[in-house]
Image (cartoon, rainbow, N blue to C red):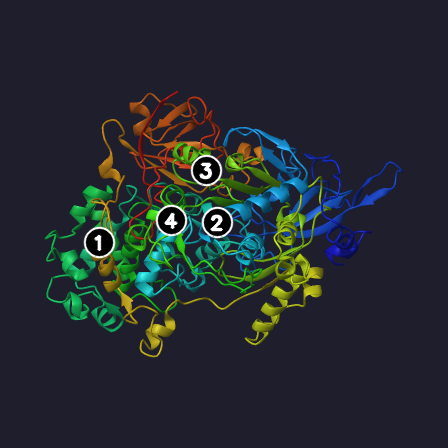
Amino acid sequence: MTNHEKTSVSRRTFVKGSALAGLGAAAMGTASLFGCAPAAESTGELADTGEAVADTIVWTHCAVNCGSCCALQCHVQDGEIKYVESDNTGSAELGEPQLRACLRGRSIRRWLQSPDRLNKPLKRVGKRGEGKFEEISWEEALDTIASEMKRIRETYGDEAMTSHYSSGVCQGQVQANPVKRLLNLTGGFLNYYGSYSSAHISAAGTYTYGGGTYGSSFLTIQPGQLVVLFGDSPADTRMGGGGHTHDFAYIRETTDCRVITIDPRMTDTTCGQGGEWIPIRPGTDGALCAALAYEIINNGWADEEFLHTYCVGYDEETLPESAKGKNASYKDYILGTGPDATPKTPAWAAAITLIPEQRIIDLAREMHESDPVYIGQGYGPQRRANGEITARAIMVLPQLLGQIGKPGMNDGRREGCASVGLGMLPTGENPVTTNIPTFEWPNAILHGEELTALNAGVQGADKMSSSIKFIWNYAGNCLTNQHSDINLTHDILADESLVEFIVTSEVFMTDSAKYSDIIIPDLTSQEQISISSDGYSDNMIAVIFGAPVYEPKFERRGIYEVCADLAERLGVGDEFTEGKTREDWLREIYDETRTANAEKGMDMPTWDEGYAMGVWKMKPEPIVKLADFVEDPVANALPTPSGKIEIYSETLAGFEATWELAEDEVVTALPIYDPGFLGYEACTEEYPLQITGFHYKAHTHSSYANNEVIQTAAQHVAWVNPVDAEARGIKDGDTIRVFNDCGEIRIEAKVTPRVIPGNVSIPQGMWHDADMAGDRVDHGGCINTLTKYRPTPLAKANPQHSNIGQIAKA
């Protein structure tokens, strides 16, 4: 018996009666919001007539930006979710993964059916950021949005329009694309490149390997080998069956590999699964890499045959002609024969990293003696003021050892992931060619016409032609909560002479939504028909087929249908829809993917078969990154200017010579160590501590952070080392002040040796809660009250782990 045969109401009938029903229907109640799950054998509850009411099992998926995407089975009665199961299809053996949701996805009933959901369109009646709104009709909301889009475009030009960076609905094939499609059809918009997650490592990968963030699969790891991870904790970030947590746990159990994690915090990847933790001072990974390189080169362990065949810039022989004769090679830099005349010895690095000199010496030997050795990094080390250069420095280590292109080896990037290659709702061609770095948007509001390719990383044009005047914020909390320096950003957004109109599509009144002129209530992915591939995992590829869990409630509407109505008002209705519904587009996307994969020998189910299954999975071949290149570097040249791995980048040397950089900003041809602005060297007597953020199991960025049941299970607290706590009279459980020149938060202290002295670690993503007309002290524990807004030198990205400050008992 299939899951869909367990009930007297078929899932297909339910979908027909709910997913395809008219949008904007009147609401049902939200009864049984906190009801407990029934016993496993129960198939229903007694109705008023005394007869059992059957569950309808509706497949859907989690959709937030955690890096995973897990399947959910919602048991629905009378238009309400009663309880949620996850994936229970196939084998439950360790090597046969299921897309089991973590505690975030399993709590989705409380999230979807929260009494705090936005239900009707709202118009601002107070000051921006004040949070005062009144309900309006959809007609007024759409007329106002369309009118403002026309006015601002006609007044300031197409570049004044933008769709804001967001990741609240990153899993699924629609996302913010309807907004971008609408903007493109009406003249285009200022677009962005990079992301808050990985802009630095992406830039590092581009100038080293020609592009890409991901390396080889965990599944290639060999029995007994060494695995070294810099700032990478799958158990904390990519939880659930749809992420790397399962992959890595499986590999560790089946290969008995030795794992070393290098991190300022003992993560759950080490604490929960074993291995060795090497504590490191935040932001100093590049110094450690330089010292490891010193040991490798000085002891004759460098694979010079590999370096001479595949790499540019290791030594004088492999330097490009433009750099020869200047002692400009990586080897010169490491051994101290370069311009700075400083050998990068383990003793030199020990003073910087706080890792004992002997441990650095031993680690270099262990990496040399393990064949293969898997060297990778997460996104933590690169979210700093020196993030791009740090990511490049980590990538050099496997190059030095020749540990690239074979099973068990990685190229120093993040662990690899497989993909089914699902397409997206097409946005069409953007008539505006100008792109800015994601993190530059506040500068593009304040100084748009002054931003250029040389001072702000503008691409597609020499400079911007207009400041941002219109923002559409779809499913994003990066206007304030997830962006740096909330107090500064508040001042920018609250000034109505700058951005003249902001529209937000949301499911809750987030901190960012408070800065909107119009808020429209969105439907979640689970409340609409959807498809999604699994997340970043390497031991499966999967497609989850999601049906609406119930009919649309109150006046909530899906973003595709909203944009279709706006397109009609703006005279591009037929061009926007092409006569297709949301479901039509999804069918087309899926069928195109299925046809393309069939040509590669992949047998995917039909659309109807997939929806009958709920979830489809298959095992991919393990990914060995750069294997073809290593086999034949001429026939399979990399997309770098040289066609090789570039330890020395002539492109970056050109940037160094021409870009407008501050005195404390470094863009360099080599992956040297630089502390970056607001690194440990910036600490003062007033602000002696570094303050870093980390991803946490209780929420994905800010998604689910308002779900109290998860916050109770996994409390949001600041991690403080006992040495730092004792010096300030702070005990475990005390409420503390964390403050610097940007602002102040109040949060509970967790006194623990699992964080290195001199560093306070705070989970990122909690909702900002401050009186912005008063003292601005944040009682929500949002770390971005404390993070400085200043784009990094190369990627112009977010340095949100580079902070200094102080703590005191509140």
Residue corresponding to mark 3: 480
Q: Which one is closest to the eye, mark 1 or mark 3? A: 3
Could you tell me the amino acid type at mark 3? Thr
CA–CA distance in space, label 1 to label 3: 33 Å
Residue lying at the far front in this picture: please name it.
155
SS class, disc 4: loop
CA–CA distance in space, label 3 to label 2: 16 Å
Identify the residue at image location x=41%, y=67%: 624
Which residue occupies the foreground of this view, 173 or 772? 772
CA–CA distance in space, label 1 to label 2: 36 Å
Which residue occupies the foreground of this view, 113 or 515? 515
Residue corresponding to mark 4: 275
Residue corresponding to mark 2: 162
In this view, 662 is above or below 189: above
SS class, disc 2: strand
> Going from the N terminus, do you reach mark 3 or mark 4 first?
4
Other-residue count near label 1 (Cα within 10 Å), few / some / many at <14 / 14–19 / ≥20? many
